[in-house]
Amino acid sequence: MRDARDKATPTVVQPDAGAEPGELRAPAALAPAQDRALSTRQLAWRRFKRHKLAMASAIVLGLIALAAILAPFIARYNYHAIFTGPVTDPVSAKHWFGTDELGRDEFSRVLYGGRVSLLVGFAVAISAGVIGTFIGSIAGFYGGWLDQILMRVTDLFLAMPFLVILIIGSRVSIFQGVKGIVLLLSLFFWMPAARIVRGLFLSLKEKEFSEAARAMGATNRRIIFYHILPNTIGPIIVTSTLNVAAAILTESALSFLGFGVQPPTPSWGGLLEEARSLIQVDPGLTWFPGLAILVTVLCVNFLGDGLRDALDPHQRIVGKE
């Protein structure tokens, strides 16, 4: 009899604490699942938009990149055009950043220098990310002797004196010019991505979805590219973003030491090296390329922080999305 009465007892929906008198609210389990229906990309974009510093950095970085791309249309003069007049003209309506010791417009040279520095930064980040992802995925998925060989090669590159090798390598003809610098830096920027991807593959290949795909007869290639690799995109993007800043700083350091992109092609580091001897006469020649490097690197780092927080699965807390 008690069982029958229990079954016949209707379920009473308790009023919500924040409801008005006489109003009943549906429990959380029955609430519309609009928020919970968001895709992974939508959730990541929502979290990224809440990172105000990252959003502002993305806008500033986009404006810098756009100015560099449109340098032929924005610059008032050619970057190697020489104007007669006093050495290192100060800032004026004719020359917004002044002129260098040869009479070349500094504003035009900073714009064109940004094209080289940004090209090197993004190209190195992409190429090093591809190399590191390939090596890390192969090592982490197959393991065994292949993993040992690839990781020992990675440790060998990490143990090399980085700056010394770059300076020596920049003297080789194949590593000269913008393409050569990109190739040289790519050879020494893939190791962090490889170790991160390897660790992720070691963990993800033991997960239930990988075992289920293997049980259904999926090939290793399909498991790698369709099941595991998409789950590592977040850390890969963050690592590649930080590599952009590192590559820009490294190229600037090499150019400042005279081993990077050679004149007459301008780069931000090369402009600093050219202005080094005139820092007492016209310090503005060092301020503008230096500020360009500083702002760009800060924006890239803040953007990387925002992407890391947005793509971190541990940030997906119910009720805070």
Image: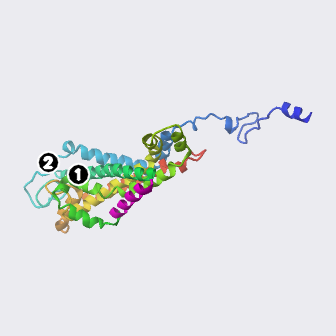
> Would residue 179 be found to the left or right of residue 145 on screen?
left
Q: Crowding near pointer 1: few (<14 within 10 Å), some, many (20+)?
A: some
Judged from this view, the residue extending furthest toward the top is 8
Residue furthest toward the left?
A: 84
* Residue at left offset 38%, top offset 47%: 58
Q: Which mark is residue 116?
A: 1
**Picture quadrant where residue 174 is located:** bottom left
Residue 152 point in image, percent of width and height: 38, 61
Q: Which residue is mark 2?
A: 78
Determine which quarter of the picture holds residue 287.
bottom left
Was residue 144 drawn as part of the magenta stretch in this picture?
yes
Foreground tag (1 vs 2): 1
**Considering depth in this image, is 38 or 154 the residue closer to the camera?**
154
- Tell me how the rendering is colored: rainbow
Residue extent of the magenta highlight: 143-157
Amino acid type at mark 2: Asn
How far apart are labels 1 and 2 at the CA level? Answer: 15 Å
The N terminus is located in which quarter? top right
Q: Is residue 185 magenta?
A: no
What amino acid is labelled 1 in the image? Val
Label 2, secondary structure: give it.
Answer: loop
